[in-house]
Each structure stands twice: as C-alpha cells, then as structure tokens.
Amino acid sequence: MSSLRRLVIPLLAAALVTAMAGCDSASDSSPPGIPQVKAMRFAGVDLEYALQRVAAESGLLLALDQIREQDNAPDLALYRIDLDLPAGTVDAALRKLKESAGGFDFEILDGVIYVRSSMLVTTKTPFDLPLLPASSFEGNADDLASYIRKTIPKSFVTIEHVLGEPVAPKVEFEIADKASVKDVLLQYARAAKLGWSMYRAGYLVSDPTHGAAVVGSSLQLRGSRTSTSRRPKVYNQMSTNGALASAAARLKLPMVVLDRSVFMNTRGFLNLSSQRDSGLPLSEALDDLGASGWGDQSYHFKWRMVDGVPVIESRDFLYRLAGRDLLRSELLAGEFDGSLPELARWLSTHQKKPTSDVLMGGEIAEGLPRAKLTIASGTTVLQVLVAFAKSSGVSPYVLLLGGMNPMSGKVLTHPNAWHGAYVQDLAEWLPTEEELNSVSGVLPPDWRPTVK
C-alpha cells in the first residue's frame, strides 16, 4: 500500500465520523420557529394545571374543550400528572402529558393549543359542524355567544365571568362561510389574546328538526398561568386559613393544617369563614380562631400540639372519615432531602401498603424551602409532615378529596379520577394588609377623599 493511500483512508474515516456526529447534533436540535418549553417538574398536579403551565411557558394560548357533569364534577382537572418534563418543543411536552395521563387530543392551530377531552360526547353537535354563514363580527365574548345562539338553533352557550380572570375585550374579525362554533371561538381567542375553557354539559337533547345538541354549555376566558401557585382565582381573602397563615408568619412557627376540599380544588372548608389573625399569643390565637362564636358544639377547627408543631384539624376534616386513612398510612424506611412538593411525591411512593390514594404536591420550583429527614419504617404520613414542618419552617396545608364530589356528596364516577389529598404551602394563602383592608372596609391611614 502506498504512503498516499495509507494517509487518505484515515482522513476519509475521520471525515465520515465528523459528518455522522454533525447529523446527530442536527437531529437533536429543534426546527427554528417551533415554540419551546423549559423543563418542568410536576409532583402531583391535575392535567388542566399542567396544560396551562405548558401553554404559558410556550407563549401560546390554550383552548380547553371538556365536559361538565350534571353534578358539576370537573373533567381534565381529575387526571393526575406526576412527571418530570424535559426541556423541548411544546409538541413534545404535550405528547408526554398525553402519554402519561391520556384523556385528550390536541392540535396546535395558529398560535392556539386546542385540547379536546376524550370524555366529550361522540355525537356531532352544532358546535362541531360547519353551519355558520360568512359574516363580519364585532363585539366581546358575550356578543359572540349571543350571535351563536341566534344563528344556530339549540347551540346554547353562555359566558361565565370568573373573578380574577381578564375582562373579555371587544374585537373584530371575519367569519368564513361554513365555519363551526369551534372555529369562531378560536378566532376570538387569537383576536383577544386570551385562552378559554369550554365546559359542555354531559348530556344531549335532540328533536326531529335540529338533531342533537348540547344544552347548558359555558365558556370561561382564561389568562396565562405564569405562576406555580395553585390557589384558585375565586377565594375568600379574609378567611380562617388566611388568618392561620398570618399567625404562623407572625409567630414564626410552622403548623400542619388538615382540611377538606369543598370545590374539588385547593379551596377548603377553612376558606369559607371570614376571620383575621388576632395578634394574640399562640394558644389564645388558635383558640380564638378555632371557635365559631356559636357555642361549644360549633367550631371552625380543633388543634393540638404534636412534637412542638400545632396540628389544625378543621370541622369538615373531623366530620367525615373519607380519605383520612392516608394520613395514618405507614411508610417504608428511607432518607429524604427536598421541598414540600418533592415530599408529597416521596410519601406517595413509599407507603408500606400502597393504595389508590396519593398526595398532590404541585410543581417543583427553584428556591423552595427544603428539609433533610431520616424516616424510620412504620412512621406515618402525618408524622413525616410534622417533621418536615419543624425542619423546614413550611406549614403544610393538606386538603382531602377522598374520592367524593364534595358538591354533590356522591362518589366520583370519572374513570380517571385521582383520590387522595392536595398538599401545598399554607403561605400561599397569606393575605396582604391591602387585601384585608379591602375586604373588611377598613381605609388605609393615608386615605383621603377625592375632591373634584
């Protein structure tokens, strides 16, 4: 073999390896212009929350099309997501959510992620059919709903205005001939730069003239979920759980608060009553907040000290047994080092006798307070929550769901409904002085009447 040939062959091989490496690198990179999402860690959130966070991080609008049962049970909010999403394209993130939970299909349509629940009725209704004539539209969401009702018989849809969500703006756009209700609702989302969630009633009516239709459907406009807080938009700002959060912050003493969900979200019984922190020492403050003022048989909560940490048990928590076994569940031995959402994940996966009950810890974010615990075999979930509070300074707020619809008192029939409890930091409910003054009617010290 000549010296020239011996030199050329290694060079060709090296060039081939370099080219292959370049191909691998290109295949891992995302095409330009495709919306990206950062890595996100969900340690027990509902599917609706996860979809909202993915949409917000991608910069796209989100349109959710789902059902509402006759007892007002939710749909996509009953699917549980416990998943670490890697950074990547929004399409890849949505596919991973679908693979994890199922229950929906999605399309990315000109800046809007359209998600359709698989629980929707399969029968085509006037909402889905190309029935609208070509026309020009100008107005807000209420005007659009009125136009739909007038144009397509039996397409009854109303706009639900949710406190804390953006006000529906007035927009203009052209409706194409043979457009569907879905098409024009997506047009409105793009023009208004707002997402929406449509709740279709879970039953049909029909007549010989107009065929099948969904009755009692509603549309809620939604802003982007840029925060990891799971405190609902509608809540009582001056409440018992807010007063407990204020007392815990003032006394620099963490608590464990046990409550029960009343609206199938993180709003519990203790958020229904109106109270403020009294500023008293610990025992007097908790006694004052726990009493309802209507005698010994009526109360907001009972409390006791466990290893130096106040454990609060709401009246609704004590009144019903459903779901309370989760807190008495014994755990496997192990080491834990992490935040409250990570603890919820750890507790769900380290029970000695696993059941269908799980803890929904929320999204794992940077900078959350942490604790390092050594957990002995046989320690209960409640004991670990107390130990975490004592070590981290965080007050775990636990809201049982227990497999029941608290609004109807019936067992959840949704095939994918999760059972267990929400876990969140009580500090999420800490009210500001401005909020308390606004709710109670107290004017700030620097307030002066406006003189015209």
Image (cartoon, helix red, strand yellow):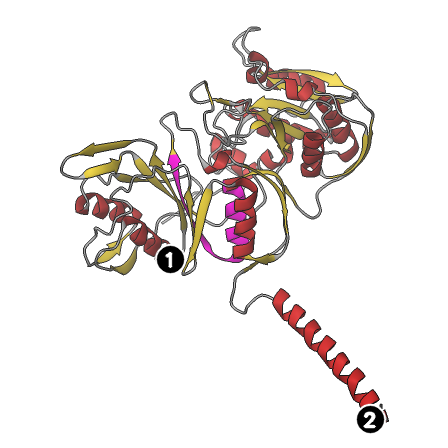
How many dots with numbers?
2
Dot 2 amino acid type: Leu
Give left or right: position of 241 versus 125: right
Residue under numbered circle 1: 190
On the image, the x and y values in percent for residue 231 come to 54, 36
The answer to whether mark 1 and mark 2 are in CB contact below 8 A is: no
On the image, the x and y values in percent for residue 35 come to 52, 61
Q: Residue furthest left?
A: 209
Give the number of the disc on residue 76: none
Mark 1 residue crowding within 10 angstroms, few (<14) / some (14–19) / many (20+) = some
Residue 24 vertical position relative to residue 446 in the rendered view, above or below: below
Q: Is residue 292 magenta?
A: no
| Residue occupying image coordinates x 44% and y 35% | 75
What span is in magenta? Answer: 48-67
Give left or right: position of 38 versus 149: right
Q: Quadrant of the N terminus?
A: bottom right
